[in-house]
Amino acid sequence: TRPMSNLAFVEATLQIFASRAAAELERRHAETELQKGKELLELFFSQSLDGFFFMMLVEPVRWDAAVDKEQVLEYVFTHQRITKINEAMAAYYGVSREAMLGRTPQDFFAHDPDQGRRLWRQMFDTGRLHDETEERKADGTSVWIDPSTSSPPGTSSAFVLSWSTSSCRWEQNSRNRSRLKYWNSSRATTYPA
């Protein structure tokens, strides 16, 4: 009976090692696929002619009837920061990517904070934003953009702002003056923090 019990022990031990080896192979495969996906996303992000950036808060905030939305909006407006930006977006503003990192909504709308707060409130209330906005380049010149923005429902932890920098046309706006309008060619996708 001794060899049988050893055989059972050996089989059980081999099954444990086989299971662990299979799990390790699955983990490595998943890591490889995840890395490939990250590389493809980075390639898309860096090579796109459309401008993209991510803005994030350190911690998500609540956006519902139980909070003082003005207080939350003030916090978000001064603490949500650009954490990633592509060259197309930086070029659109006429600065380097490094100069854009860390910028807040308050920085973008220093020329018209009421407009910025109205847009951020609209985005948090509806979960998306698609509204023509007037912003400023680094040299102070006015630019008109047509953003497509999304944020996770109930939070303002992360969102992507996207608009096209590759196709544009001159048109007259309602104030009867010329300005450059950028037409969005893709939808933004949210990646939660």
Image: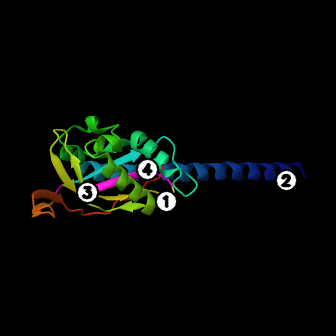
N-terminal of the pair, mark 2 or mark 3, is 2
Q: Are marks 3 and 4 in contact (CB under 8 Å)?
A: no
The total of numbered circles placed on residues is 4
Number of other residues with Cα within 10 Å of mark 2, as a class: few under 14, some 14 to 19, many 20 or more? few
Indicate the amino acid at tag 2: Met
Asked which secondary structure carries label 1, the reply is loop
Indicate the amino acid at tag 4: Ala
Q: Position of residue 98 (x, y in %)?
A: 28, 35
Q: Is residue 23 left or right of residue 95?
A: right
Indicate the amino acid at tag 3: Trp
Question: Any magenta on residue 160?
Answer: yes
Residue located beneath label 2 in the image: 4
Question: Any magenta on residue 141?
Answer: no
Q: Are marks 2 and 4 in contact (CB under 8 Å)?
A: no
Residue extending farthest top: 99
Q: Is residue 27 left or right of residue 54?
A: right
